[in-house]
């Protein structure tokens, strides 16, 4: 193949781009990855999933150490060393970034630092950090440029008093008072981190409940748990204005009752969503269609051109790292003629790593009813779980939403200890089209947290044993 010619050119090396590139290498495609940063891994590894969860783990350990005496472990002088927490976070990130480089070498994937821009069918211009430019050609191009933190029209991050999640990951000290605007996964995770680090945290959410994409019962349980931890949540509250100064941050809002809400903090964290990075990638030189800032694709992530694919935060599918990775695999296998199964977006797990953890898959109870199902619900609280009692983790429950006639599993919702790990069983169950009865007849080891899933499945037919 001539110099500058590739089977596949990938623009972006986040969890979608680098996973797709590795699969391409495994399939024997000559693959080039273009990444603007000097390291691989994208937002997820460097400014998102991994560093956030590292700080959450520090918060978990801090909390457990403070509660150690109740487990027979006396810990004196327990305190947060934020600098050491950041050092641990960076160590984890660096290790993973080097791991991706090793995987590229193992699978024959080439990568170059620079900004990629499409010039025409299969043609991509690479602008290196020093400004030099090079043109390469690929039989296929995979766009995986991801997204960036979003602002509000009247409230924008300044990196000082008003910060976004990128800034929050690098704070050198814990603010005494932290306002969090947005009660989705990002806002609730950072609220959980900094509350346990010692900040007085207040969350403000425009919609009627925290974690508004989750089942309403889950939202209610999490808000109750946050309140017990001293975190205040203002839901159905619209922010009208924000002022900054030496005093910190002042926020004016109105709630659903029309009452004025005034809040003050040292910093305001904007957790109001992300914006797809579709500008500057050369879409004007393609046939790709963009609606509401997202590239439209078919079920194999192919845009309106046989050579162009787009994945991850660029397209109107769930903005989750694991979704982007699977989309990368599907797109590349389709390019290679492997006829992969399209992704079932109704079976995508959603995870929030706050305390208590939240995880779900499938339909919520209201969604199932809206779709006309005869719904049966099984529910089991962790307060009745032996393993949860051992862990001292009694908050939360498992809720199973099933169809009444045959017991088909429609959705599983978990709030409580290790929810983000427990959801894997539900993923396999929905993928395998199991019924609640089949799940109930599956023997679960004792004592484990997984027994709560078994009991909730029994509860679908009113046969829960341990409550």
Image (cartoon, helix red, strand yellow):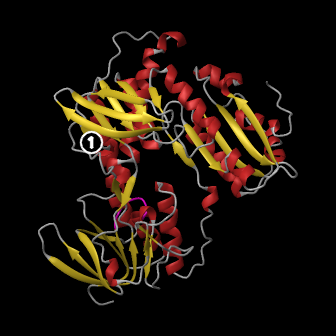
Rendering quarter of residue 246 = top left
**Residue 305 sits above or below residue 366 on the image:** below
Q: Which residue is mark 1?
A: 167
Q: Is 398 on the left-hand or right-hand side of 26?
A: right
Q: Is residue 147 magenta?
A: no
Residue 192 in the image, given as x and y percentages of width and height: 43, 31
Residue 160 in the image, given as x and y percentages of width and height: 20, 38
What is the chief secondary structure element of the magenta stretch?
A: loop
Rendering quarter of residue 32 = bottom left
**Residue 250 sits above or below residue 100 on the image:** above
Residue 91 in the image, given as x and y percentages of width and height: 30, 41
Stretch in magenta: 12-16
Rendering quarter of residue 76 = top left
Viewer-nearest residue: 98 or 210: 210
**Residue 158 sits above or below residue 255 on the image:** below
Residue at the image position 62 percent from the left and 23 percent from the top: 394
**Tag 1, which secondary structure?**
helix
Quarter of the image for the C terminus: give it. Answer: top right
Whether residue 170 can be seen here: no
Viewer-nearest residue: 53 or 366: 366
Q: Is 233 on the left-hand or right-hand side of 365?
A: left
Whether residue 331 can be seen here: yes
**Residue 225 sits above or below residue 31 on the image:** above
Residue 104 in the image, given as x and y percentages of width and height: 36, 65
Most extreme residue toward the bottom, as rendered? 2
Q: Is 438 on the left-hand or right-hand side of 314?
A: right
Are there few (<14), some (14-19), or many (20+) residues within 10 Å of tag 1?
A: some
């Amino acid at each position: 193949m001539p110099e500058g010619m590739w089977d596949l050119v990938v623009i972006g090396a986040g969890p979608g781009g680098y996973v797709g590139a590795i699969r391409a290498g495994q399939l024997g495609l000559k693959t080039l990855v273009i990444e603007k940063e000097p390291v691989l891994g994208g937002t997820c590894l460097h400014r998102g999933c991994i560093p956030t969860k590292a700080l959450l783990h520090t918060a978990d350990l801090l909390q457990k150490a403070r509660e150690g005496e109740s487990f027979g472990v006396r810990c004196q002088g327990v305190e947060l060393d934020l600098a050491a927490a950041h050092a641990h976070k960076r160590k984890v990130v660096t290790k993973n970034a080097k791991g991706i480089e090793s995987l590229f070498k193992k699978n024959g994937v080439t990568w170059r630092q620079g900004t990629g821009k499409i010039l025409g069918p299969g043609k991509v211009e690479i602008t290196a950090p020093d400004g030099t430019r090079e043109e390469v050609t690929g039989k296929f191009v995979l766009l995986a440029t991801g997204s960036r933190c979003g602002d509000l029209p009247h409230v924008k991050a300044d990196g000082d008093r008003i910060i976004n999640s990128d800034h929050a990951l690098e704070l050198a000290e814990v603010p005494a008072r932290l306002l969090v605007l947005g009660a989705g996964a990002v806002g609730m995770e950072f609220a959980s981190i900094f509350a346990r680090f010692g900040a007085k945290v207040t969350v403000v959410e425009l919609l009627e409940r925290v974690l508004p994409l989750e089942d309403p019962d889950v939202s209610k349980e999490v808000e109750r748990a946050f309140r017990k931890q001293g975190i205040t949540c203002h839901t159905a509250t619209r922010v009208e204005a924000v002022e900054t100064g030496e005093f910190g941050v002042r926020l004016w809002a109105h709630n659903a009752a029309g009452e004025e809400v005034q809040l003050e903090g040292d910093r305001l964290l904007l957790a109001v969503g992300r914006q797809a990075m579709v500008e500057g990638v050369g879409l004007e030189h393609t046939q790709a269609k963009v609606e509401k800032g997202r590239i439209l694709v078919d079920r194999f992530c192919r845009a309106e051109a046989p050579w162009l694919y787009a994945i991850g935060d660029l397209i109107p599918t769930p903005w989750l790292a694991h979704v982007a990775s699977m989309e990368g695999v599907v797109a590349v296998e389709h390019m290679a003629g492997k006829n992969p199964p399209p992704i079932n977006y109704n079976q995508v797990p959603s995870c929030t790593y706050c305390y208590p953890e939240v995880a779900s898959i499938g339909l919520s109870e209201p969604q199932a009813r809206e779709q006309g199902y005869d719904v049966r619900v099984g529910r089991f609280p962790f307060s009745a779980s032996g393993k949860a009692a051992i862990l001292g983790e009694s908050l939360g429950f498992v809720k199973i939403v099933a169809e009444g006639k045959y017991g088909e599993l429609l959705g599983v919702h978990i709030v409580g200890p290790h929810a983000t790990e427990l959801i894997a069983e539900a993923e396999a169950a929905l993928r395998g089209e199991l019924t609640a009865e089949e799940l109930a007849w599956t023997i679960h080891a004792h004592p484990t947290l997984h027994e709560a899933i078994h009991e909730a499945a029994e509860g679908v037919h009113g046969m829960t044993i341990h409550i």
